[in-house]
Image: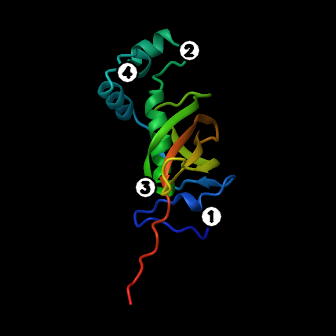
Amino acid sequence: MADVVRHKRGGIYFEDFQVGAVIEHGLTRTVTQMDNMLFSNMTLNPQPLHIDAHFCATETEWGKPLMNSLFTLGLMIGISVNDTTVGTTIGNLGMTDVGFPAPLFEGDTINCTTEIVAKRESRSRPDAGIVDFLHKAYKQDGTLVAQCRRQAFMRKRPAPATVAV
């Protein structure tokens, strides 16, 4: 995807996504206890598995709080935005096949990849298309901690400006 036309904000237009391409995102993020507490509290999630260290130490197999899986999902997709959809997406259409195959804990650092798994022209909008992304997040030791398939409604490249003579 070396010769893509990018939006001024950096996103890729529908035409330039190539099915089968895998993007390794440069952004990484170490997750913190504050991330977990803020996200769980902002979403009114009182699950002690995320916010109660004593509960986790005495009543769970993990011995420490797990990162909130919806935070992990949002972070994984957020990391992908700079390299894929910033300025070029019309909106998300859905997410499927969401999974969290291994735990993520405070202090872990995640990195992400995005594979372009499918794309098609919009049937209702000639200026747009639908792209299917497969996002994956790994922690620092290479363990897969999250994945999801996401469909996004994407802009096509704007028509070149015509100059009247």
- Which residue is identified by label 2? 61
User: Which residue, as the protein is rendered here, is positioned at the far top?
Assistant: 59
Which circle, 3 or 4, is nearer the viewer? 3
Q: Residues within 10 Å of mark 3 (few under 14, many from 20)?
A: some
Mark 2: secondary structure: loop
Residue at (38% x, 90% y) in the render: 165
Please state which of residues 71 and 96 is positioned toward the viewer in this rendering: 96
Mark 3: secondary structure: loop
Q: Residues within 10 Å of mark 4 (few under 14, many from 20)?
A: many
- Which residue is identified by label 4? 51
Picture coordinates of residue 95 (x, y %)? 53, 34
- Which residue is identified by label 3? 86
Residue at (63% x, 41% y) in the render: 141
Residue at (48% x, 51% y) in the render: 125
Label 4, label 1: how far apart the Cα atoms are: 42 Å
Q: Are marks 3 and 4 in contact (CB under 8 Å)?
A: no
Label 4, label 2: how far apart the Cα atoms are: 15 Å
User: Which residue, as the protein is rendered here, is positioned at the far bottom?
Assistant: 165
Mark 3 and mark 2 lie on one chain; the one further toward the N terminus is: 2
Mark 4 and mark 1 lie on one chain; the one further toward the N terminus is: 1
Label 3, label 4: how far apart the Cα atoms are: 32 Å
| Residue 126 versus residue 35 in the image, above or below | below
Residue 88, quarter of picture: bottom left
Mark 4 and mark 2 lie on one chain; the one further toward the N terminus is: 4
Picture coordinates of residue 50 (x, y %)? 42, 22
> Horizontal placement of 98 versus 159: left or right?
right
